[in-house]
Amino acid sequence: MPLKILVTDPTMTMHERHLRQSLPADVEWLFTDSADEAALSDLLTDSDVYVGYQLSERMAQAARKLRLVQVSGTGTDEIDFAFLQKDVVVANTFNHERSIAEWVIMGMLALGRQLIPSDRHLRMGVWDSIFHDPAQQLYPTLRNKTLGLVGFGHIGREIALLARPFEMNMLAVKRRADAGLATRHGLSFIGGLEDLPRLLKEADYLVLALPVETGTQGLIGRSQLEMMKSSAYLLNVARAGLVDEDALYDALAGRRIAGAALDVWYRYPTEKDGTGQACGQREDRGNSDMPNQNHNRSIAIMKQPHGEIRHCTDGDCTQRERCVRNERRSTAQHQKNRDRGDDTERCCDRKAGPVVV
């Protein structure tokens, strides 16, 4: 019987031609973009290899011939190990840490320099410049700022490598303290998770780069966010579940921290809506539902979709569509005001939330 490989990860579909050429011709490949659990369970009944990021209990129980689960990412938290056959091998993927590390550097620079709010304000006719507004402050550099890395595996080490030329002071925590590892990678300190409070208190940029597992789910909650500097930024490139969602929202809304950059989110849609915008936010937690702000003291927030398609309720999608429509309506009304010569609805006056990308 030929080897049968089922591929469900859309990031692998673009490489279909190369993958087919890399193995003997008698290997049977099946690429699908379906997210339907029942349909995938049927396809898994006679599959030898599964390539994807999510394997539910139902899918695992159906996969009686399965020999290998290849996760196309580092995290295996979406694989239901308890229902897999005992001889099934589960493997994850590395070698994408450079891309993630570059995202972190981008995030730190964009947050610290208020890049997104400044861009939004300029498009609305507001100049965020000390020459036009004495209340503005000079933008800080990364030099001598403290970078706190929670997790120091492949991704954490790559972030440290790219941050070193910026002359940042770097600290990290991982499962166990390792002074020798700190010396080899140019960090002043690598402690265990019990040393997390030190990072929270000292970091100007706190980066989460560790897996969700027993002991790390909800690792950053209200008490941890309260330990952070009010000028500090949180960057999460791991899993949303590491941070308590309500606590993060309240910390941002209350200006307890300066901002956040999120490469991961709490809920993902099953599909994209008609405008191509990914939905998936809670009804009571709109992306822009923050207190009224002055434009020279904006909270900086970046949110980038991780590309995963998951369960999304009708309410989630309705809320996202409403936000898109309201944003378009607000922009159109502002342009009409400007066309009439009425420029009173400036960015520093309007009731807008922090900018989200």
Image (spheres, rainbow, N blue to C red):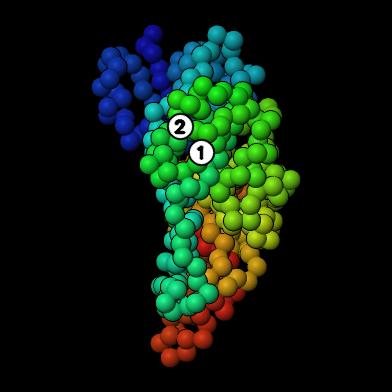
* 326 is higher (above) or lower (below) than 247: below
Q: Quadrant of residue 348?
A: bottom right
Q: Residue at x 65, y 36 (%)?
A: 196
Residue type at the position of mark 1: Met
Query: Residue 346 at what x, y percent from top left?
Result: 51, 80
Q: Residue at x 45, y 25 (%)?
A: 184
Label of residue 170 in the image:
1
Q: Residue at x 48, y 16 (%)?
A: 68
- Give the side of residue 34 with respect to residue 313, left or right: left
Q: Quadrant of residue 290?
A: bottom right
Q: CA distance from mark 2 to mark 1?
A: 8 Å
Pointer 2: residues within 10 angstroms few (<14), some, or many (20+)?
some
Residue type at the position of mark 2: Gly
Which residue was labeled with disc 2? 186
Report the front residue among 38 and 163: 163
Query: Residue 250 at what x, y percent from top left?
Result: 69, 56
Report the front residue among 329 and 167: 167
